[in-house]
């Protein structure tokens, strides 16, 4: 935090968004019914109740990659995105053809990578997915990014003509759940909070196996940096009888750099005042604290965010 704040220490704080006309901000979220959309709707309600002169308008999207593109082209002012996709965007890595100008307001919570299969099926490890159909996230989603990277790390992606490659299907969460239930895919990737309601419902319908992924964290960090961490799906969730190690990826609340500093500060004040309400629908047991929120890696903090965190730390 010291380096980030030092760079922007001379930036003016800006005026408060609570004075003057209402500032309307479009927020790129995710598919309707998904966790990003739930977070966006909750944030819109919290901001409306705050009386701070800001209106948040949630925009349904395909999620992370799509959101970053919309932020870059100016069709939204705010966006939610997974940390790996956000870093790809600001660094100009694939699938982004050039560096995207995006700034972070906060790291708001951590996604847990889920890889689940039917318990009565033949798949017991990632390598068993060779040649098998896998629901690997919707096009333009952060799920697709992490799924492809896990499969590539195990030699199951990047060679579509090979029998060793998994058959990656671009499916969102609801179609993925239906496909696994019906048997048209053998595995399902998902990245989200714990528990994810759609997966909890599926686990009550049929026996599932959640495959451990924590052994791949080192390879991902070596190639893509520390956006990936080892986390654990706890025993009890989804009916698990013991913990399952997996891959954690942060989620960022992002803003265009031209969002006024005072508006960004007011928005963050609402986020920290109402974080319990915001996170209730997306992940259980999470907390939002400034020391966590400023950990945005290669994605620079918005000057208004810097001013907010400086005020918190004194």
Image: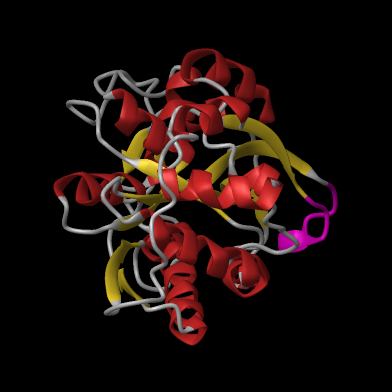
- The answer to which quarter of the image holds residue 34 is bottom left
Task: Report the side of 1 relative to 145 (left or right).
Answer: right
Foreground of the two, 147 or 43: 43
Left or right of 126: which side holds 179? left
Residue at horizontal 26 percent and vertical 25 percent from the top: 94
Q: Colour mode?
A: secondary structure
Query: Is residue 274 shown left or right of residue 299?
Result: right
Q: Decide which of 53, 163 is in the foreground and name it.
A: 53
Where residue 246 appears, x then y in whole percent? 66, 37
Please indicate, yes or no, whether residue 11 appears anywhere in the rendered image: yes
In the foreground, 167 or 231: 231
Magenta stretch: includes residue 19: no
Residue 161 at x, y percent in the picture:
24, 20
Q: Which residues are magenta?
A: 234-242
Please say if 11 is above or below 216.
Answer: below
The picture quadrant where one finds residue 22 is: bottom left
Q: 110 above or below 205?
A: above
- Image location (x, y in percent) of residue 28: 31, 60
| Residue 8 location (% of width, % of height) | 45, 33
The answer to whether residue 111 is visible is no
- 86 in relation to 66, above or below: above
Where's the N terminus, which quadrant? Answer: top right
Q: Is the stretch drawn in magenta largely helix, strand or loop?
A: loop
Residue at (16%, 52%) from the top-left corner?
Answer: 74
Q: Which residue does the image show at 61% across and 23% down from the upper left?
A: 216
């Amino acid at each position: 935090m010291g380096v980030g704040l030092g760079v922007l220490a001379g930036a003016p704080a800006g005026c408060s968004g609570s004075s003057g006309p209402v500032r309307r901000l479009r927020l790129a979220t995710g598919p309707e019914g998904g966790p990003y959309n739930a977070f966006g709707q909750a944030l819109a309600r919290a901001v409306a109740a705050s009386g701070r002169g800001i209106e948040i308008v949630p925009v349904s999207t395909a999620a992370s990659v799509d959101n970053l593109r919309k932020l870059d082209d100016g069709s939204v002012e705010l966006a939610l995105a997974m940390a790996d996709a956000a870093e790809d965007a600001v660094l100009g890595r694939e699938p982004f053809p050039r560096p995207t100008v995006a700034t972070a307001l906060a790291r708001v919570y951590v996604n847990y990578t889920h890889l689940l299969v039917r318990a009565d099926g033949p798949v017991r490890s990632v390598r068993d997915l060779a040649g098998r159909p896998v629901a690997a996230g919707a096009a333009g989603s952060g799920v697709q990014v992490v799924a492809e990277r896990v499969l590539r790390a195990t030699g199951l992606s990047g060679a579509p003509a090979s029998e060793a490659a998994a058959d990656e299907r671009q499916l969102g969460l609801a179609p993925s759940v239906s496909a696994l239930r019906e048997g048209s895919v053998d595995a399902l990737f998902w990245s989200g909070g714990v528990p994810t309601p759609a997966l909890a419902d599926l686990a009550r319908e049929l026996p599932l196996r959640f495959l451990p992924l924590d052994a791949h964290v080192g390879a991902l960090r070596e190639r893509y940096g520390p956006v990936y961490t080892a986390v654990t799906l706890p025993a009890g969730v989804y009916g698990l009888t013991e913990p399952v190690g997996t891959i954690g990826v942060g989620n960022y609340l992002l803003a265009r750099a031209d969002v006024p500093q005072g508006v960004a500060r007011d928005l963050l004040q609402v986020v920290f005042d109402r974080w319990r309400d915001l996170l209730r629908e997306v992940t259980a047991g999470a907390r939002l604290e400034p020391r966590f929120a400023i950990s945005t890696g290669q994605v620079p903090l918005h000057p208004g965010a810097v001013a907010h965190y400086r005020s918190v730390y004194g």
